[in-house]
Image: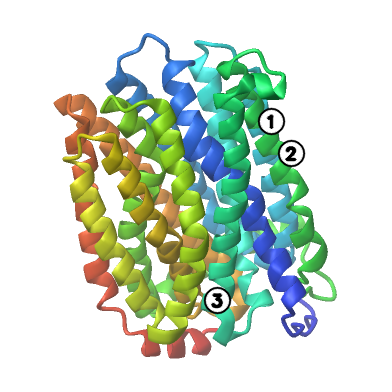
Amino acid sequence: MHDTPEPTPEPTRRAAYAWACYDWANSAFATTVMAGFFPLFFKQYWNSGVADTLSTFRLGMANSIASLIVVLGAPLLGAIADHMDTRKGFLLLFSALGVVMTGSLYFVAAGDWQIAALCYVLAVLGFSGGNLFYDSLLIFVARPTQLDRISALGFALGYLGGGVLFAVNVLMVLHPDWFGLPDKSAAVRTSFLTVAVWWAVFTVPVLMSVHEPRAAQPTRLRAALSQGFGQLRHTLRDIGRLPQTFLFLLAYWLYIDGVDTIIRMAVDYGLSLGFPSNSLIVALLITQFVGFPAAIAFGRIGERIGARTGILIALAVYMVVTAWGAFMSQVWEFYLLAVVIGLVQGGVQSLSRSLYARLIPAGRSAEFFGFYNMLGKFAAVLGPALMGWVGVLTGNPRLGILSVLVLFVLGAALLTRVDLERGRQNAMKHG
């Protein structure tokens, strides 16, 4: 058991911006690596000469394996972090893993798709695990009335920061001679190194400026591990006693599956349709810079009309985008869809995080955000695998993307059934 904990300090603007800076840091991995160059390089460099449907399947499996590891470990890690009062310590550990593995992609030779996939899986594990503990710190940097705005600030800075470095990386690939690089392959490999450095440097503010209340004598690792397993059982029991929280998690699990699948597989899908790789990268860049102001706008939308309404608006847009994407045939359509996705992607992510923060006991944030991230990553186990399998079985990537539509529909339907006021009251009782 903990001794009497420190009182939670009043959130400050400096702490909020330092916290949001981590989104600026690790979003470079989400853009340059996950969404941008890794799918492209995986298909054309590490899987050269392999059928498109097979390389898509391999990429889908790599994403799914990484997510499955997070699924199995996130709730337990969250419970342990809460007992040890060391969310920032775990954030540092997973960020370091992501940084090292991302930088390691530079050294993987052409054709070595297995090694590339292993480095990628471990890097995604670092990225996803870091996000678990980053999310859990939100309640320490924002007052309850600021949750939507501060959560949106994080995603907005993430889009901007990820977009800035991605723009530099795109210039490196389009004009490698400007950077003293011999060719495009060297430029892509070097971009992985720049992401690692960027991620490491901009993780420092959250570690230095965000205050995490600690017990007088935090639990030691061995005891925390034992208590973590016990707490995990209690969490499962308590989530059952928080029916509105459980219903939200189920809805989130479904609709975020579609969001994550589109993020991770969009470039691969465009390549399968025969679109030029440069056009696909430019489209992703458009999404990033549109996403910056749009995420801030969705934070205001959440404050004015409610987080749930904002999420439902975004999901309706995703349904249209998914249906259109299954039938598009021109590159300009990919550009237009990139703009539309940029308008809502940050909104659905940030408002989901802030809505969930209202439905959980305040003193067990890492533990409950462990489940939140578990469900999000479990969705990412199913989505890319589903898209890959449908493509392999039918030989038609369009049917794979169309299968994602049902996830948005079911997730939105369940979200409308969540009683938010009852959920907040129940969370307070179990705090």
Determine whether label 1 and label 3 are within 8 Å by CB. no
Q: Secondary structure at mark 3?
A: helix
Question: Which of pointers 2 and 3 lies earlier in the amino acid sequence?
Answer: 3
What's the CA distance linking mark 2 and mark 3?
28 Å
The quadrant where residue 97 appears: top right
Q: Secondary structure at mark 1?
A: helix
**Residue topped by disc 2:** 197
Q: Residue at x 74, y 51 (%)?
A: 202
- Could you tell whether 341 is left or right of 201 in the image? left
| Quadrant in which the N terminus is drawn | bottom right
Answer above or below: position of 242 versus 131: below
**Residue topped by disc 1:** 193
What's the CA distance linking mark 2 and mark 1?
6 Å
Answer above or below: position of 73 versus 174: below
Mark 1 surroundings: few (<14), some (14-19) or many (≥20) residues within 10 A: many
Q: Which mark, by number, is residue 149?
A: 3
Q: Which residue type carries mark 1? A: Leu
Mark 3 surroundings: few (<14), some (14-19) or many (≥20) residues within 10 A: many
Q: Position of residue 369 (x, y in %)?
A: 53, 65
Q: Residue at x 78, y 59 (%)?
A: 205
Q: Which residue type carries mark 3? A: Arg
Question: Which of pointers 1 and 3 lies earlier in the amino acid sequence?
Answer: 3
Q: Secondary structure at mark 2?
A: helix
